[in-house]
Amino acid sequence: MQQLSNDTTAMHAHRHGSYQLDIFRSAIDVPEHCRAGIIDLLNEIISTNWRLDSPWWSASDTPFQDGYGIGLVRLADQIVGFTIWRRLSIDGRPVICRSGIELRPEHQRKGLFGLLLRGVLDTELSAVPAGSEIYYTWRTRNPVAWSANARACRRLLPSLSDGRSDSSLKDIAVQIAGILYPSREVEFPNLIIRNSYPNITYYNQPAYESDRALTETFRRIVPDTRDAIFTVGTVARPSN
């Protein structure tokens, strides 16, 4: 992975203490000679948090394709976490779809989720005019991840914490989910997608220690470890 750190022409860097986040807004800008090694590394990092029946990423199901972005968190020369996202367009408005975020256990609770979130949103919002609002989506069964993403949004569906779901996002949610998960239907009102994780389960189901109510909501809504909650929100670039 040392060679990757020297290929910086398509990369934006963000720092958090001793950590650096390298962002490739277009994952196809990652040098080809690095891709196989990175895919192996992504699966290895995932396996520190999940039991995998088969590799999550592969040469045939790869993030290194048009419309995908990738961010790699490194400490010195070691990659300790990553995020992947996909860009869509619905009715001419950009959509950012988070496809995964993983950190090695020993690097969790160090503010790196926020680093990844800011890195992705800053990168994508810098590509739209000031004041523009774009859609932001994610799928998870992790209440901590859900809460962090939700706090970044102006509007939200579903809103699991305060109950103020924006029903105007329902049609957009159906359209986006239909693209991302064409073989599955979204179940309202909580936007549950069944069998989202068919070949993968957490070693330890995440809990939000400072928000037990949200943790209990997840346990109640998606007790089956294969299911997840899909969420659609909007984020906006400041108008100066």
Image (cartoon, grey):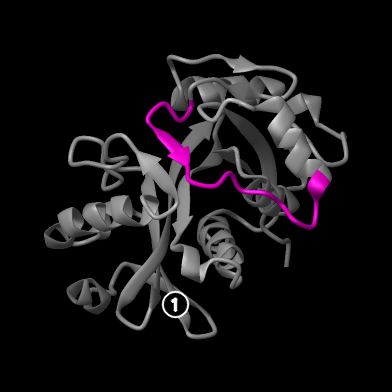
Q: Where residue 33 sits: x, y (%)?
A: 11, 61
Residue of label 1: 20
Amino acid type, mark 1: Gln
Q: Residue at x 42, y 63 (%)?
A: 81
Would you identify the image quadrant in which residue 91 lies?
Answer: top right
Front one among 126 and 142: 142
Image label count: 1
Q: Where residue 12 sits: x, y (%)?
A: 41, 71
* Left or right: where 175 falls relative to 221: left
Would you identify the image quadrant in which residue 198 lies?
Answer: top left
Residue 163 seen: yes
Front one among 2 and 137: 2
Classify 10 Å Cα crowding around label 1: few (below 14), some (14-19), many (20 and above): many
Position of 230 relative to 126 (above/below): above
* Left or right: where 224 falls relative to 55: right
Residue 25 seen: no
Task: Give the SS element for disc 1.
Answer: strand
Position of 206 relative to 216 (above/below): below
Q: Where residue 100 sits: x, y (%)?
A: 46, 46
Would you identify the image quadrant in which residue 53 lies?
Answer: top left
**Prevalent SS, magenta region:** loop
201 within the magenta span: yes
Q: Where residue 145 sits: x, y (%)?
A: 62, 50
Q: Residue at x 30, y 55 (%)?
A: 44
Q: Residue at x 37, y 46 (%)?
A: 68
Q: Which residue is farthest front?
A: 203
Q: Which range of residues does the magenta coloring cover?
A: 196-212
| Quarter of the image that includes the N terminus | bottom left
| Quarter of the image that includes the C terminus | bottom right
Front one among 237 and 204: 204
* Left or right: where 43 falls relative to 178: left
151 within the magenta span: no
